[in-house]
Image (spheres, grey):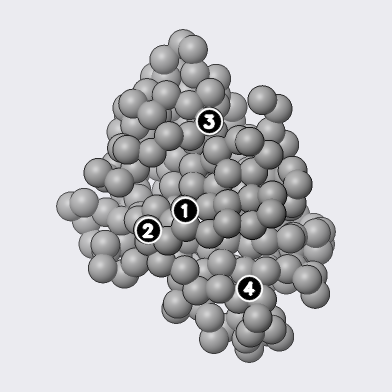
Amino acid sequence: MNPKINVFAQNSILISGSYKVYFDPFHIPENFHDADYVFITHPHWDHFSLVDLLKVRNENTSFFVPKEIYEELLDIGVKEEQIKVVKPDEIYYFEKMSFQVIPAYNILKDHHLKESNWMGYLLTMDEIIYYIAGDTDVTPENKNIAADVLFLPVGGTYTMNYEEAANLANLIHPKLAIPTHYLTVVGSISDAENFCNLLKKEIASKIFYKEK
């Protein structure tokens, strides 16, 4: 397994394989215009950034999004047929990729309500399964997934903290676990480091984002 991954701020992730797939593009450093697909987990400003979408989008890019941002994409010139509104528990299949929509929500906080139908994604591409959690706590739904690569928020306050994230990673037992959602809004590089240190020794980890 040799996935090609980059992680920018917050939950901004690029997975490169049969397709160039972005999740929640944010603080993208330059104009790449190389996205085949863009996935948005929810409409908060640090996950849905029009400025950054324009840096990765091209005329053929397709979008998978929650219903709240459909109209905003139309307003910037995205064609209706290039936008698919998705919701939790749906599964989609393509020639070289498939994905399942996983609910993302808080358990005892009201920042991300379950009834909002915001989401994470379980992506399968090139025989690798990636779980991009989005802004979520540990939930019954994400305790029961299977994945090779995990992207989990570790900053706390609005999501699970690093200890909760490490416990979830140890339960799922992927080959690789990557911390997200720290430094930019809440959390520190120490949260990312502590997350990695709490993983079982057979689970590889990598910290991508170290800037503020």
The residue indicated by pointer 4 is: 50
User: Which residue is at a point 56% across and 67% down the rendered structure image?
Assistant: 64
Residue 117 pos. (x, y %)? 34, 66
First-in-chain label (2 vs 3): 2
Residue 128 pos. (x, y %)? 61, 35
User: Which residue is at a point 65% across and 81% down the rendered structure image?
Assistant: 81
Disc 3/disc 1 C-alpha distance (Å): 15 Å
Disc 2, SS: loop
User: Which residue is at a point 74% across and 60% down the rendered structure image?
Assistant: 35
Residue 172 lies in quadrant: top left
Disc 4/disc 3 C-alpha distance (Å): 30 Å
The residue indicated by pointer 2 is: 89
Query: Which quadrant of the figure contains the N terminus?
Result: top right
> Which residue type does callout 2 highlight?
Asp
Foreground mark, 4 or 1, reads: 1
Foreground residue, 22 or 36? 36
Is there a contact, CB below 8 Å, between mark 2 and mark 1?
yes
Residue 116 lies in quadrant: bottom left
In screen coordinates, is 29 left or right of 108? right
Residue 148's label in the rendered image is: 3
The residue indicated by pointer 1 is: 100
Q: Residue furthest left?
A: 108
First-in-chain label (4 vs 1): 4
First-in-chain label (2 vs 1): 2
